[in-house]
Amino acid sequence: MSSGNDCQPQTSTKPALGEREAAELVDRVFGLKVSWIRSLPSYDDQNFHVRVSAEGADEYVLKITNSEDSQEPDLIQAQTQAMMFLSAEGFPSATPYLTKDGNIMSLESGGTRPGSKKYMVRLLTYLPGTPVAKITTNAQILYEIGRLAASVDKVLSEKFQHPSVKSLHRDQFIWNLANVPLLDQYIYALGQNKYRAVVEQVIEQFKGKVIPKLSSFRACINHGDLNDHNILVDSSSASLENPQYRVSGILDFSDMSYGV
């Protein structure tokens, strides 16, 4: 999901590297030879699943951040540090493979021509699993996801500290729930859709009932996009009669922010 404040057109900011270019990037920046690579779906960044050994034992995700968000290195630093922190706390979160220079990320040009856009590049550990969106959910996994979401927010709020955290205070960030009134400027996109009146009513009720009491809500660091495409589950032990799942991965921290 887009993490920009001004919602630039996706096509103007999203990277568009081919598989060969991506493999060369892994070699040049991280010093690893890619033996297998395939593109992964992504909204406004570009992701590749890569293997760097013939046996497939070492797998990573090459994450190339869109050119807009790449201009905010402190924000990407905060997101990555949060991922590393959560992994150390026992949560199924990816961690970065360091560049040849010993950094967690590198700003790279998207082409050889002068003026080519630059993108922040990271190589993250690959998390196996199936997106929740692709399974038939049951009470057990929904409970696990709810407990996980609460635990993530709790541990980030109580224990996560890093100088880059200040970048998560994103006042005009449209995906922060406190900023629901910012949606007014996009109502036009609904045209004469039958749900337009409902959306307008919800925004007005938020302004009248929630905004005046906003200061009484507890603020904390939020993942911001914990949807069914960004949660992986392990279904290896599931049976058709009694499926049991466990959360095996938390993806996409690009919409993190500090707020309610």
Image (spheres, helix red, strand yellow):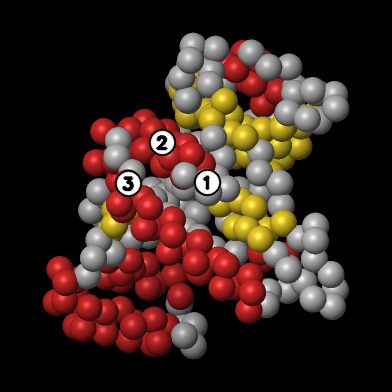
Of labels 3 and 1, earlier in sequence is: 1
- For the point 48% across and 39% down, the residue is 88
Q: Name above or below for residue 98 compared with residue 37.
A: above
Number of numbered markers:
3
Pointer 1 or 2: first along the chain: 2
Q: Please tell me whether residue 218 is drawn above or below residue 125 in the rendered image.
A: below
Q: Out of 195 and 229, give the one closest to the viewer.
A: 229
| Mark 3 neighbour class, 10 Å CA radius: few under 14, some 14 to 19, many 20 or more | few
- Residue assigned mark 2: 81
Query: Which residue is identified by label 3?
Result: 159
Nearer to us: label 1 or label 2:
1
Q: Mark 1 and mark 2: span between their CA atoms? A: 14 Å
Kindly identify the amino acid type of the residue bearing the numbered disc 3.
Answer: Lys
| Residue at the disc numbered 1 | 90
Amino acid bearing label 1 = Gly
How far apart are labels 3 and 1 at the CA level? 13 Å
**Image coords of residue 156 (percent x, y):** 36, 50
Q: Is residue 75 left or right of residue 134?
A: left
Question: Helix, strand, or loop for circle 3?
Answer: helix
Mark 2 vs mark 3, CA separation in Å: 12 Å
Q: Looking at the image, which is closer to me, 142 or 68?
A: 142
The amino acid on which the numbered mark 2 sits, given as a three-letter code, is: Gln
Mark before the other along the chain sequence, 2 or 3:
2
SS class, disc 2: helix
